[in-house]
Amino acid sequence: MTRGTLLFRVFLIMAVPVLLVCSCFTAVTAQGELIPGQELLKNGDFSSDLLFNLYTESGGNAALSIQNGELQIDVNKIGRVGHAIQPYYDGFRLNEGVEYLLSFDAHASLTRDMFIRIQLNGGDYHAYFEQQISVTEEKQHFSLPFVMKEATDPAPRLCVNMGFVDPMAAAGLKPEDIEPHTVWFDNFSLTIKDVSGLVTDDSGVKISPIRINQVGYLPGAVKTAVITDLDADSFTIVRSPHGETVFEGTLSAPVYNPSSGEMIRIADFSGLNMVGKYKLITSDGTVSEEFPVNRQVYDKLLRETLRMLYLQRCGMELEEEHAGIYVHPVCHSDLAIVYGTNQKIDVSGGWHDASDYGRYVVSGAKAAADLLLSYEMNSTLIDNIGIPESGDGVDDRLQEARYELDWMLKMQAESGGVYHKVTGQNFPGFIKPQEETEQMIVSPISNTATGDFAGVLTLGARIFTDSGSPELAALSSTYLAAAERAWTYLEEHRNDPGFTNPTDIVTGEYPDGKAGDERFWAAAELARFTGKDIYRSAAAEMLASGEVTAELGWVEMGGYGLYAILSDQALSKENEAYIMAETLLSESIQRIRSGISVNSYGINRMNEFEWGSNMGIANDGVVLLMGAAIFDNEALRASAARQLDYLLGENAAGYCFVTGLGTISPTYPHHRPSTAFGATVPGMLVGGPDSSLEDPYAQNVLASCFPAKCYADSDQSYSTNEVCVYWNSPLILLISALTGN
Ligand code: G3I
Ligand code: 9MR
Ligand code: ZN
């Protein structure tokens, strides 16, 4: 046979079946061509890498392996719900309107029901496609066509619910009636069947090539915009709404920014100090979002970011007057069980950490410390946040911090040590706070929690003493006594290992094997407030140990201790500890500034953006402001303000990273209350770019992103789009300090 004939025959063999099963045209999307017959799963025949994982909960216990070229699931305990055992596969896309064909083989050591699903991988995890199947000892081939009827999902999950499924209960069975058994799968395939119904949607967010602080600028501040990938070489600023030109400038020469993969020019319009609303227009006609310049420009931002903390309060009723639609009755108020014991204790109160309703001491201590320092760095009264304590003449930042500190007192054990956290065994579903009714468990004591507790309660004791509020001042001695007991415990347990989750608790870990920095912070605060030698010498010893850095948590807390020493008026500048602290702070400032100087976005990040990078950037701003105050250096204030500009829109993602503020801000944060109440809570700083892609959505949708752009506004992306009390708090501190004097 000639080559031509062979090719012709191959074409015929392939074309005929395809022509029979579909209307055979392809479709083009922004992500590439959709071709009927195209396989979307990798290694569905289990001949090489295992790309399936196993999720278990609610008592489910199983093991997943490849045996003889099949996927084998050994079910030891079936659990209490259908998804108690769930093998799953991520890493494909479903386009709206397209018909797919899902097929696989399955058999089991006994006959049983299960559900094959393709579902949303987050939120309410509802199924786009679900089919009940009965798997028997005899191998069966399943071939299941379906149409994706919902909006295109770039990162759905294929899974099998093979825990205790509803048909078992309907048949009168109980979980304990189901014996251990084995199920095998093979030849998983998901192919495109028919693209004729494809629905394309180009309504997605359009990011402007002009990156600007969308919330606005203070008169007198340094003001810049980052202009990306444009041919323009100059710009004008026009006043809204009539368009008169108020400023003209030349753009800087283009520079390549490796962390975002863009050619960047900078527009500097620091000379624009007149109050008003403006737009920036480049010489090629590109127009920016509107931005204001005025003295009150951050008032709303400060109010909303603070109110977010109130909305995270646990253990009290949130009433409509203050919470608006986010009302809820008292939540998480039942006694919690101390892990590994029968002891039940009251640990109600405090803030829900983030999207989850866990309450963690290390992260809460950081958040409360930032609020206390925000007052110390700018004590102009803020009493109009709209929380129950507003309007009483006492600063709302202090009263919000008090809510957390009072809870922390309950987290201290008899021994003086402090429990690490209180959470359920697992993260809850996307439900309202009061709907998480699982038994709360208090995790064991940790050195990091104990050190942070001593540090922040002493800081609270000191600041409350000078707050002008007799009610707060009265708490001071209780806080200090608790802090000193924690200190004593810490001294007796210096060699204890860092906290790790007990094997059956899978909520946030806040792992940190080094408690030297927490011990330093505690010593520095205690020394400053009490003046006692034991604390002074402990702080000096830690400074000399090399374990202290000027970071602001949650991992490294040394920066708080450095600030306590350096702002202590009672300490001579010749004091050895003072000099060591000064050196550490100024070295850290040098490092931040040298990073900033080589990144056109003005931040100390290049190829690596960590989970919660927005907190890290806000923290950098705070370190710079501490330096500005201590070294009396105005230039550091401008660099700190640049960190705020980044967070509010002058960044590579083009988002104002605070919900509900600016013109393009996160709409779908990973935040259970926002999802459960059906409306995004305003004033929440999201985590921001995480170049390590630490959730399945990010892994699918952001694969090969430039580090500074590894951000997705999706409620599934908990590693880039979650919110936390301790991410809002350094932002509150930054705004408070920048708007002072
Ligand atoms: O320490 C390394 C650093 O050396 C490295 O350069 C960098 C690279 O990205 O990673 C650093 O470690 C990261 C660590 O955070 C400290 O920044 C880890 O990769 C990263 O996985 C880890 O993420 C933490 C995440 O929990 C997972 O443990 C976040 O900081 C932390 O904010 C987050 O906290 C969760 C709670 O557990 C539960 N509640 C919600 C909260 C927010 O997502
Ligand atoms: O909602 C959880 C969030 O608060 C945590 O930061 C994150 C990482 O620990 O985990 C989230 O919970 C997810 C879990 O880790 C994996 N299954 C899906 C959960 C919700 O999307
Ligand atoms: Zn609660």
Image (cartoon, rainbow, N blue to C red):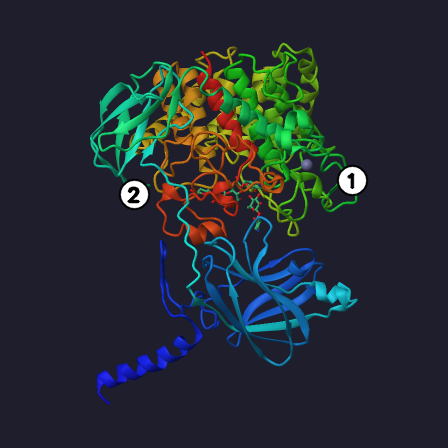
Q: Measuring 68% from the left and 11% from the top, which residue is drawn there?
A: 470
In the figure, is residue 345 to the left or right of 221? Answer: right
Sequence-first disc among 2 and 1:
2
Q: Measuring 40% from the left and 18% from the top, which residue is drawn there?
A: 218
Q: Is label 1 within 8 A of ligand 3 (CB to nearest ligand atom)? A: no
Q: Is residue 487 visible?
A: no
**2 and 1 marks in contact (CB < 8 Å):** no
For residue 43, which quarter of the picture?
bottom left
Q: Which residue is mark 2?
A: 261
Amino acid of disc 2: Gly
> Horizontal and vertical percent for residue 676?
62, 42
Q: Which residue is mark 1?
A: 344
> Horizontal and vertical percent for residue 598?
29, 33
Look at the picture and state if 145 lies above or below 602: below
Q: Is label 2 within 8 A of ligand 1 (CB to nearest ligand atom)? A: no
In the figure, is residue 22 to the left or right of 256? Answer: right
